[in-house]
Image (tube, coloured by chain):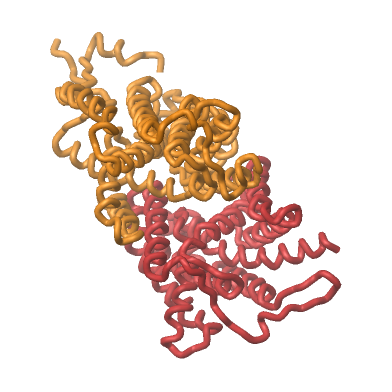
Chain colours: A red, B orange
Amino acid sequence: MIWFNLIIQGILVGGFYALFACGLSLMFGVMRVINLAHGDMAVVAGYVAVMLTPHFHIPMLWSFLVVVPLFGLVGYLVQRTLIQKSIDRDPFTTLLVTFGLSVVIENALLQLYTANAQTISIGSILYKSWHPASIIYISYQSLVVLAIAVVVLASLQLFLSKTGTGRQIRAVADDQEAAQLSGTNYRHIFGVAAAISFATVALAGIAYGMTTQFAPTSGGINLLFAFEAVVIGGIGSLWGTLVGGIALGIAQQIGSHINPQYTLLGGNVLFLIVLAIRPQGLFGKKSSL
Amino acid sequence: MSISPREIGSDLVSIRRTTHSPGITLVVAGAMIGVLTGAPWIFPASFVTVLMNFFILVSMATMWNLMAGYAGMVSIGQQAFVGLGGYATLYFALKGMSPYVAIPFSALTCALIAIPVTYLLFRLRGGYFSIATWVVADTAGIIIGTIALFGGGTGRPVPGFTNFSPTQITNFAYLSCWFVALVVIAGTYLLLRSRLGLVLSSVRDNEISARSSGVKVTSARRTVFIIAAAGCGAAGAVLAIAQPYVQVSNEFNIQWAAEMLFVSMIGGLGTVEGPIIGCVIFFALQQSLQSYGAWYLIIFGSLAVTIAIWQPRGLWGAFRDKFHIELLPVGYWTRSKKQ
């Protein structure tokens, strides 16, 4: 029964990791950019929800209605300016620039809002949990986050396969020059991909803020989890990311069961094992490495 | 790769490795080495402390620049080796070795740990390599933090200083930082002038043509990674001696990676002088904005981003291209001989 519970809890956390990671995976798939400020964007979204929504007189639970579109816009703008400029240089520069951004964002948040932890209060029913068996507690909140992750991944998959813009995104990801020759404005497509990435990570940031406390420096560890989920699942596979997130969640639960200090170690060990045995990940293709 | 540059030089072209400026460098460097060795007896204590931190960062940044600027590996996990170096020093000191003697052994320990690590990390490229280095650093920090001998997460003071007076401890700590920086810079300079330096330059300029000329790119990268691990380990060792206390949250802090990256980028990637100049700017900014909290990092980070996009050769690179001055030249100038 203990093991069954570990797996259940792992799956619930894994949904959150997948929500966090899908934007990272999309940006890498489309424009070969690893956004090292990805985790910090989620934290910024959390701060925007906490600090700005009182001014709009809406409950924090609904803050995502404002924050998610706002971050989509920010993503498009950041991509068309800073990130595009660094892509034009070389892939190396994108790493330096996004890491630089990450440190600047963390320290700016530290300066503006101090190191105190924040949380997004939602009250009501979501804090309760479902108790189907003796030691198994399933919080409604994690269940909602998992459901959101599945919905987001499914809509993303639908968007990429059914819509014109989605097809253009896939075309640019497969062969940028051929897509350009067929009349696709790849810079605009990059912007759209970044907008989706930022919007999903903003959603993940708000979900994170509802689940636990966050501080200016919380971004780094979440980027680490997102990245581990992407690599374990396989680079370039959306559903792989969900499976990777769940595998990571279960590994962490097993680690924490052995010793609470080993929670993160469990995930890291799984990541290193996958790297050693199957570097392309569970669902990845070898060529995408 | 069987023809050495000298053989080419003998026949068709003449090769120079220096301009006039290195002569000047040598005289200035000699004087500077003298002054910096005597610094604890010349300058006020507060400035000596700044110099100590300066040399620790110079050592780390020089190693980071060797990896990123010459071998194309962006590591954001070098704090792994800073931490392991610090804890190796603690371990040797606990076993009765003098902490000063432990510095080279700590560096060697880091180099040995780095060997198996490269076999894992080199499976990934570009950004994935970068984040994987961070996973390794995170894992190393967690494991060290669970070892009771090292005091767990709260850390432990480094023993072995009881025979010295407080003044001696400060002076020796300074000299350790300074000599490690000197060895790291001189070693990097000589390394870049060696055959490996030539290989690295060819990979940096065009990896595909380097590979097709028979350059063993992966093994060159592996060598650089191991050397950088040793260098960062030595920096971690002197950091432990300077404190003299080791703690996971300090030694394994990702802030080290951020600072290494920023100073290298601002000073100039792929130059020996760049990281040193970047460090000078970093500490000047830090000292003058001391009372404003983290603002120096915000300003410094923004500067680094700006430079990466608009001036990727850094301040020293731009300066050098404009005035054709090389203080520590590692390249070749060729000129065809008149028949």
Residue A124, image quadrant: bottom right
Q: Nearer the viewer, residue A7 or A30?
A: A7
Q: Quadrant of residue A160?
A: bottom right
Instruction: Identify the image quadrant of residue B140.
Output: top right
Percent of width and height locating residue A42: 49, 67
Q: Is residue A158 visible?
A: no
Relative to A155, A82 lies left or right? left
Q: Position of residue B191 (x, y in %)?
A: 37, 24
Horizontal side, residue B139 vs residue A26: left or right: right
Could you say where residue B292 lies in the image, as x and y percent from the top left? 30, 61
Q: Nearer the viewer, residue B118 or B205?
A: B118
Is residue B191 something that shows in the picture? yes
Is B28 above or below relative to A113? above
Q: Residue at x 19, y 36 (%)?
A: B320
Q: Is residue B248 above or below residue B237?
A: below
Picture residue at 22% right of the left edge, 17% below the top: B15
